[in-house]
Image (tube, coloured by chain):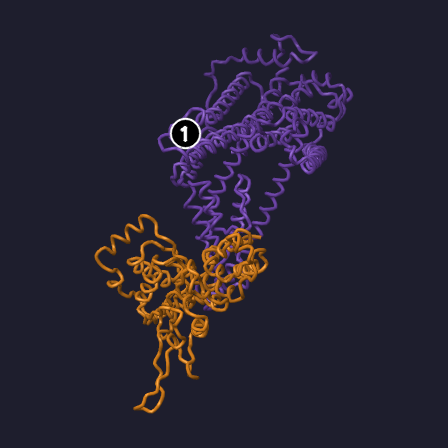
Chain colours: A purple, B orange
Amino acid sequence: MTLACALFSWAVGSLLGQYISLFYGDWNFPVWLYGLLFLLSFESVFYSAYVLSPRTPLTWRFLEIGLMWFLVTICLRMGRSFSYPWWAVWRAAVDKAFLFPFGLAFLTWSIAGGFGQQLSRMKRIADELGDQAASTISWEFESLALKPENSSIPLEYFLRRWVGFAVLFAGLAIAVRRSGIQIASPFLMAGLYTLLLGTGLVAQGSAYLERLATIWEQIGLEYPRVLTANWIRSLLIVSLVLMVLINVIPVDFSPLTYDDLVRFFFSLLHRFSADSPALPEVPEEDLSPPGGGGVLQLPWQADEEEPPMWAGIIALLYIVVFVGGLGMAVAVFVGFVIVTFAQSELERLRGLPKAAVQFYLAVRTAFQQAYSFVFSGFRSVKRYAATKAWSLSRSQGEPEGVYTSPSRRDDPLAQDIRGAYRQLVQQATSIGLVQKSSETPGEFGRQLQQTVPEHEPEIADFIDAYHLARYSNHALDDRLTARALSAAGSVLSSLRRMVRRKQIDRTTD
Amino acid sequence: MTEPRIDSIAEFGRTLTENISRVIVGKKTEIRLILTALLSEGHILLEDVPGVGKTMLARALAKSIGGTFSRIQCTPDLLPSDITGVSVFDQKAGEFAFHPGPIMAQVVLVDEINRATPRTQASLLEAMGEAQLTVDGTSYQLGPPFLVIATQNPIEFEGTFPLPEAQVDRFFMRISLGYPTLDEEKEILRRQQSEKPLIGLESCSCPQEVVLLQRLVRDVYVEESIRDYIIRLTHATRSHRSVKLGASPRGSLALLRASQAWAALEGRDYVIPDDVKHTAVSILAHRLILSPESEMRGLTGDAVIKELLNQVPVNAEP
């Protein structure tokens, strides 16, 4: 869903840019702007979905906008130069060469950010429903799940954005066709349209499916996986039909007239230009495609040709790696210093120090996740080898059920279960259930059952499997391990919810 | 008889518990501990006030496993030969004929053992330690199975002889039955109003089966960390501030065996730390000799072991 939302935002920004350059011949959509919009949409949607919280200081958002401003300026400058110095920001504010890219970047960033916030909200709702499902009887849960604030808003939000932008661009397409403006790259436009509709459909449908899956999970029904396949199939069919309709259907029935649209856009766009022609009497040739005689040229365009696309992409990557990397390194270092030396005072941090700490923690978590991902890949290979060795030894007549590998520590399935146990202990500690060194796993399990009574059978199953993995000489089979790990997973997610709720309570207090 | 599997031990435990429960109301844990001792080839010291069912429990167990049963009522004038048996000259045959004593049974109830003199108590040492008896230079094999259930009243001191340390150490476990609860006592009155339940009790096993299961219990898997935990526990008893003399290596061994048997009765063929914890108090507490000042404070071996169980790390996950 995050990917679909990011691509949707990027398609919106790019299409809008294309139409601006069509209606306003003085400005060409630069190639590097595709990359920049792409980068910003991804950054914004992922940041809003996974990092941003109500307690994130506003300063951090301003910094993002500042970075955006900086990137646009750098890109323009690397393309060629502005005629004014760096510090003359007020001159850039009225320069269309800067204003259009920055406006599009800001718009894309905002749309993507909105999507990201809704995704994060959907996750919160899922958690709340999960909590409620565990503590209320079924009809109460049903009523809670169907409450507007828990169900419709993210779905409606997605629908509104999707339909709204589709209508806007349909109107623009009609206007372009009726005005007779030649589109320089029709395939690009068609692609962007398809992407816009396709990703919109995917985001909307996935939101609906996710909500359905959430409700089903909470009321204990197994989610039929075939539904997802059916959904994707239907989605492809609908997307194809829409694409055909957009490219084939006549647009002359539109209530919008050519004059209305052109007047509106000219009045809007030429407002920023010093040498704007008179509004109603726009000469016909001014509407010619980019590159025509009436097109205004940027200062650097007068001397040399526009740099090729790859130069823009490389420049952008260079800037991102250098500036972004430097900024990130500084933020991570500051965050590390604060976390290391301020520890118990973290709750009191505000503003930029707090943002640095959040950034440091996010980077640390990302590294941990990457490490565990790599490690799990390594373990999978190891497990495969161990399973092969085990099946080989069994085929050679080893007694059934008795462990034959040189050591229990080599059994990857046992290691998985033991790893899950360690995670449970760790997570339980964060809600105040600390396992004493003299406590047996069985005693810990019983305490855990008292803490999360709704998971009593899962905990019992998991502890039995853990005993088998830790203290027996039996070979574990995949099914038992999978069942144990799934049980541990559900308990872990409950514990995580409790931790989050505790954090929220602490904040509210 | 076919070779039993580990599951059959759990089944044996359930059947025997059910059978004994026809006579003894409640006391499931104590019955489970007695079965643990039986499967571990250990002897039991039942220590409690009179009238709580010690003798009846021992007799119910003997009847349930279908073995030979004898009872020795200890008094200060009881002689060792009254227990072991005596060789009497047979004038017709012209030789000494051995008349076995009550110790020559598969389940022996030694009632109020602390009323016998130390000399008589010592006559039980070889029997309990080696499961054999030597009389007039001839050794006699006892059992199998051979189970001594001794009872003693911890309250009375007059006319009693406290068991020597060597004797106490030979008891695999010490169990206190304790008074029944209100409901349990009501049930006892109801059951015994018209008849003695012990009379109708029938055996549900046989000594051969017990011997096979005892052998099977030794195969229960014990992971390295469990052995370490047992050793840490017994070592901790030796360095405890209130203990003058801690548990011996025999104590460690007994705890290991008891954990194996407890696991088997739970239907597992491997030991977990909970098995050790369930049996530790009964196995180790009577082996401790507390310092005089601790005894004066009213501290007991049970309390020391419970304290250690809450201190010694299990080391489940490093």
Looking at the image, which residue is at 55% across and 58% down?
B292
Percent position of residue A416, x then y? 52, 51
Give the percent coordinates (x, y) of residue B210: 36, 68
Q: Which of A340 and A11 is in front in this view?
A: A340
Instruction: Indicate the chain on which mark 1 is placed.
Output: A
Residue at (42, 83) in percent of width and height: B136
Which residue is nearer to you in this view: A464 or B246? Answer: B246
Using the rendered view, name the quadrant where residue B18 is placed: bottom left
Mark yes or no: residue A299 visible: yes
Figure quadrant of the N terminus of chain B: bottom left
Q: How crowded is mark 1: few (under 14 residues within 10 Å), some or many (20 or more)?
A: many
Name the residue nearer the viewer: A57 or A232.
A57
Q: Is residue B277 above or below residue A124?
A: below
Image location (x, y in percent) of residue A372 = 58, 46
Q: Residue furthest left?
A: B194
Q: Nearer the viewer, residue A335 or A433?
A: A433
- Please identify the residue farthest to the front as the structure is shown: B158
Could you tell whether B70 is left or right of A496 in the image? left
Asked if B13 appears above or below A453 in the picture, the reply is below
Q: Where is residue A177 in the image (x, y as percent from the top left)?
A: 53, 19
Residue of label 1 = A145
**Residue B173 found in image quarter:** bottom left
- Residue B107 seen by the camera: no
Q: Residue at x 56, y 31 (%)?
A: A49
Identify the secondary structure beneath mark 1: helix
Give the residue type at disc 1: Ala
Q: In the displayed structure, does residue A431 sit left or right of residue B117?
A: right
- Report the number of numbered marks: 1
Tell me if residue B156 comes above or below residue A32 in the rendering: below
